[in-house]
Structure formats: C-alpha cells, structure tokens
Image (cartoon, rainbow, N blue to C red):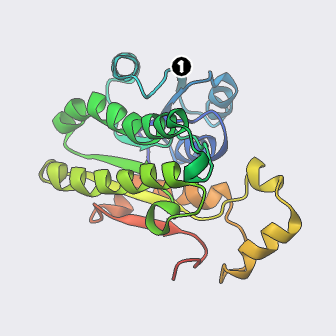
Amino acid sequence: MISLKDKVALVTGGSRGIGKAVALKLASLGADIAIVDINTSEQVVEEIEKLGRKAISLKADVSKMEETNEVVSEVLKEFGKVDILVNNAGITRDNLLMKMSEEDWDSVMNINLKGSFNMTKSLIRPMLKQKICSIINMASVVGVAGNAGQCNYSASKAGLIGFTKSLAKEVAKKNIRVNAVAPGFIKSDMTDKLDDKIIEGYLANIPLGRLGDIEDIADTVAFLASDMSKYITGQVLVVDGGLFI
C-alpha cells in the first residue's frame, strides 16, 4: 500500500486533466498539495480538502523564473517543505514545421521545458537540504518516438527526458530521485473530439486495445513519488498500453 502521509507535493498544471488527477491521487494517499497553474484551482482545492488534506492554489506562469521563485517562497511559508515536485504544466501548438510559427515554437519550449527548469531550479536548494525527495517530470511518448506535426512538442519532451537523466545524476548523492513519465494516447477532452476512425487507428496500434485514462498516469506518478520506487532514478516510465514495445 502506497502511503504519502505527512508529505507535501507541488503539482504544476494541476487545475485540470492529468495534473488534477495527479493532485487528487497524491492527496488520497496522504499528501498535502500545492497546485501551481496559470489558472486558479479553487475547485480542486475543495476536492482535496474533502479528502482530509491541506491544499493551496497559486497562480503563476512557470516560464518566468521570478514567478516560480515567488511560488516556492509561498509554498515553503505555508507547508515548510516540498517532498514531491511534479512538473506537469504543458501546452501544445501543433503544426507541420513548414507552417509552424516562431511564436508557436517558443511558447511550447518556454512552458514545457523551460517551465520545468524554472520550477526545479527554484525548489532544488530546499530539496537538497531535505535530502529525501522525488521529482517527477511529465514527458511523452512523442519525446521518445517523435510525431509528425509536433516538432515543437516532441522536442520539448525529448529535452525534458535529457533534463531528467542529467539532473538525476547531479542530485542522487543527496537521495533526491528524478524520473519522468511518458504517457501515450490518453483519453481526454482532446481525444473526445476526434473522429471515430482516427480513434480506431490509434487502437489498432495499442496492444492493450484501449486509450489510457488519466488515472493510469496518476497511479504511475504516485508510485514514483513513494518509497516503493526508492531505488529508481533517472528513468522514463512509458505508459502507453504497449504502443512502442
């Protein structure tokens, strides 16, 4: 049984989707939660409090270091520590490279990759003092395999994987573990809008025969956040139903 009792988790992009599912999962296992998002997340805070845990919602743009510094200061003031950091905030601006604007490239890289750097950099010194922490970065299977029309998104997630492995080597001696989760095709608001034939095409290539649920990702994050994975660091856990076996 996974227990995160007396742990504090900071989850970026926690107002909806995978980030919200992660926040609720960690809270259900005993952690207090700080949600950092470009949007306020009072509804999620209320749901976490119903689980008997403390929660706060902080609005910030993770692509700006001054804002991640302010967020960390507020979280430490409220909770005194952060044991678990989940860098989940991310955006897409899909297009073929020949049609992709410089703005769309920069915005994806700034949120997905630089945002994870900023939040981790802002928090790493307090974590080094604690000596037992877990950092989990939300990558993607397209960061491993690539995907047409997603050069910016794939590059940002591939960069995040390299960031994960390098940081894991830097902080392992302080017993800080750094891992990444790489979701495959996950059922979401976006996939709900896709044509049935497109979904069928995806399913034909997934050995387990279904799209993933956000809970599948939340469960994986919970495992990496817990002592059940205390000898795992620098790894990328692919959660894709066998798509890239």
Q: As shown in the figure, which amino acid type bears the numbered disc 1? A: Lys
Residue shown at 32%/29% (left/top)? 81
Q: Residue furthest left?
A: 173
The foreground one among 26 and 239 is 239
Can you see residue 3? no
Residue 14 quadrant: top right
The answer to whether any part of residue 92 appears in the image is yes
Query: Residue 124 placed where, x, y %?
Result: 24, 35
Residue 132 picture location, percent across and down = 24, 46
Q: Which residue ends up furthest to the right in the rendered image?
A: 196
Mark 1 highlights which residue?
59
**Residue 154 or 89: which is nearer the viewer?**
154
Image location of residue 30, percent across then percent down:
50, 43
Left or right of residue 131: residue 70: right
143 versus 203 height, above or below: above
How many numbered markers are drawn?
Answer: 1
Name the residue at 66% across, 38% down. 16
Q: What SS does tag 1 mark?
A: strand
